[in-house]
Amino acid sequence: MKRALGPLAFGLLLLGGWELAVRLGDVPAYILPGPAAIVAALWANVGDLASSLAVTLEVTLAALALAALSGALIAILLAQSPLAERIFFPYAVFLQVTPIVTVAPFVIIWVENVFAVLLILAWMAAIFPIISNTLLGLKSVDANLKDLFRLYGATRAQTVRRLLIPAALPYFLGGLRIAGGLALIGTVVAEMVAGTSGTRSGLASRLVEASYRLELAVALACFFLLSATGLVLYLVLDAVSRRLLRHWHESARTPA
Amino acid sequence: MTGPALRLTGAAKTYPTGTVALAPASFEIARSSFVSLVGPSGCGKSTLLRLLAGLLAPSEGEVSRGADISETGFVFQDATLMPWANVRANVALPLTLKGKSEERVPDTLRRVGLEGFAQAYPRELSGGMQMRASIARAIVTSPQLLLMDEPFAALDEFTRFRLNDDLLALWQQNQWTVVFVTHSIREAVFLSQRVIVMSPRPGRVIADVAIDLPERRDEALRGSHVFADRCAKIGALLRGAMTGEAA
């Protein structure tokens, strides 16, 4: 708790300075509203923004879950043979280096359901660190332990389940923490490009919409909500990682 | 069952890179004997052990084992425990992989002096205790053959002596066939009935020495004249091989 005191004090100082500057400078609210106005806008639209947050969160979490599952599975398959890795891994890299904004227009044309569009784009943004980290973990398994499993006649399934998966878990979780942030970024970018989906619009499309109407206080409220979502997502994934590794991995011992 | 536990017939290992890890070797290892492979690094002793374990296939010659030798225990230089599993699960691994009952685990832990540590995780144990867990895992199946690859090399001398004593006691109770790799001549002589001496570049067997020391081996033996004499003899063999190579 004490460690949070410094950053918290700095944040409050920053917000105070901002509020003061806006009031003293008489800055119009459509250029830059102060923190108080943003909080007021958040409060006035709380139900609305909460349901938008739910939409964004739904897409982000679904994309993250999908990326975690498919990414781990792809990594396990690629780890089965160096040939498979040589053939397919470049395409995973291709997926990673392609800016998803440029893919969005095509996905929007090919896929009708807006939720599916958002999901696909966020999944694309999130999957790479999972594949590459998990693959690294699978390839870093102690060679002697592998020999031991061979000596004791372990089947391939047993080796995967009881040796490869636990050994790669810390790497996978490291990838998952990065993927959490990327899934949110992917969702936001997808919402901005794909626009609103009828009645249900996410926080990022609300942000764009509000900025078009020069309701900057609402737009900034969306902005801060998205930042907070990213932060909470990271903290949750970090806590999950520590919990799963607490007995045995060095990373679970040191403070974040 | 008669016949040796293990037999090498001109077995050799050359890696695809052309490196000769082991020149053709032929010898037998008798049932229930304790045999050490000793030599400096690069002499092929670990390669030889892996051939005996079946973890490597010889590039020429043949390695065969007695038909009744089904269970093999292997101990590496590092304890090679699964860090995510507690001592109990680590020791039970050879059993659980085969779907066998784990009822032998507590008794095995007691025999290696790890009673009360079943729930501990490897990182909570000292190096010596991790090695005890590793030995427990190797013997939990009551293997007919125990292969050990410099198991105590990374431990301090006190811990090593204690583990040597405990290992000998276990061997005398159980009549396993043990092949023990070490770079310590003293350790090899202390433990073994027979020492196979190896030399590097290329890795090869240069001598096969029976150790005619009493069955009972204890601290007194370590300080005795006869023990020093056997060590000196093997040291001379190794030095001879090494200087011959340098000339």
Image (tube, rainbow, N blue to C red):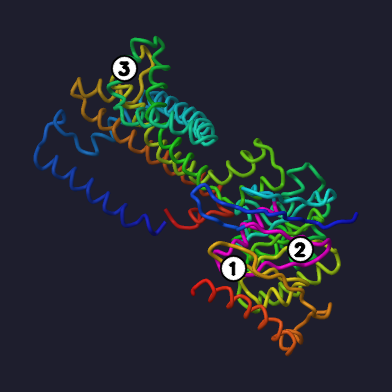
Q: Residue furthest right?
A: B1
Residue B203 against residue A148 in the figure, above or below: below
Q: Amino acid at mark 2?
A: Val
- Mark 3 or 2: in front is 2
Q: Chain of mark 3?
A: A
- Mark 3 or 1: in front is 1
Residue A151 against residue A129 in the figure, above or below: below
Q: CA distance from mark 3 to mark 2?
A: 69 Å
Q: Residues within 10 Å of mark 1 (few under 14, many from 20)?
A: many
Q: Amino acid at mark 3?
A: Ala
Residue A147 against residue A74 in the figure, above or below: below
Confirm whether the magenta stretch covers residue A171: no
- Mark 2 or 1: in front is 1
For the magenta stretch, what is the residue range? B24-53
Q: Are marks 3 and 2 on the same chain?
A: no
The residue that mark 1 highlights is: B199
Q: Chain of mark 2?
A: B
Q: Earlier in the sequence, mark 2 or mark 1?
A: 2
* SS at mark 2 in the image: strand
Residue A12: x and y in percent read: 27, 49
Residue in view at x 40 percent, y 40 percent = A178
Residue B114 sits in which quadrant? bottom right
Marks 2,1: beta carbons within 8 A = no
Residue B178 — which label? 2
Whether residue A66 sits left or right of residue B25 in the image: it is: left
The residue that mark 3 highlights is: A194
Q: Residue furthest left?
A: A25
Q: Work out whether residue A79 or residue A81 is closer to the camera in this orientation and state it.
A: A81
Residue A169 against residue A202 in the figure, above or below: below
* SS at mark 3 in the image: helix
Q: CA distance from mark 3 to mark 1?
A: 71 Å
